[in-house]
Amino acid sequence: QLVEFGGGLVQAGGSLRLSCAASGRTVSVGWFRQLPGKEREFVAAITWGGSSILYADSVKGRFTISRDNAKKTVYLQMNGLKPEDTAVYCCAASLVITATSIYDRYRYWGQGTEVTVSS
């Protein structure tokens, strides 16, 4: 089971931190985002061991993914937010041993949390 926290409304240039609380056995967690009528887009992923991290080019240098193994929680720190970052952000868990951007590799999905960036 995955539960996301931390979405909200922020002005362009601002920051938000999303949290994904996970339960059960998983190896890696990723964040995806989706706008109505558009395909789900990969954002970032990390393994629980921390040895493998992956970012989409569109968020590199602005977003940081991290994890707290004791709390079984993955975080997505989003800085320098832009209006085009507006979307529903979902976390997903995979049994793949490396961070991956491939949607089909993720077995479990959260409900999502909405992020709105105003200009």
Image: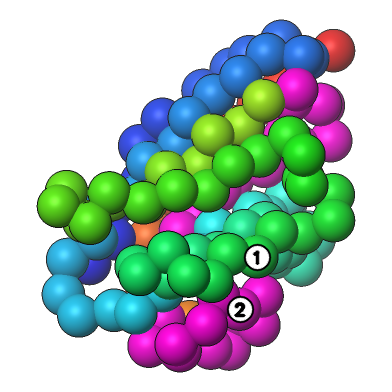
Q: Which residue lies furthest to the front in this view?
A: 51
Q: How many marks?
A: 2
Three-letter amino acid code at the position of disc 2: Thr
Which numbered tag is attached to residue 54?
1
- In contact (CB < 8 Å): disc 1 and disc 2: yes
Q: In this view, does 45 lie above or below 75?
A: below
Image location (x, y in percent) of residue 73: 28, 50
Q: Give the range drawn in magenta.
A: 80-105
Three-letter amino acid code at the position of disc 1: Leu
Which residue is the site of mark 2? 100
Label 2 Cα crowd, 10 Å radius (few <14 / some 14-19 / many 20+): many
Position of the N terminus by quadrant: bottom left
Image location (x, y in percent) of residue 50: 42, 64
Q: What element carries label 2?
A: loop
Q: Which of 28 and 85 is in front in this view?
A: 28
The residues tagged by marks 1 and 2 sit, at their Cα atoms, a distance apart of 7 Å
Q: Nearer the viewer, residue 25 or 118?
A: 25
Position of the C terminus by quadrant: top right
Q: What element carries label 1?
A: strand
Q: Nearer the viewer, residue 25 or 5?
A: 25
| Residue 118 seen in the figure | no
| Residue 10 seen in the figure | yes
Image location (x, y in percent) of residue 88: 59, 45
Residue 40 appears in which quarter of the rendering?
Answer: bottom right
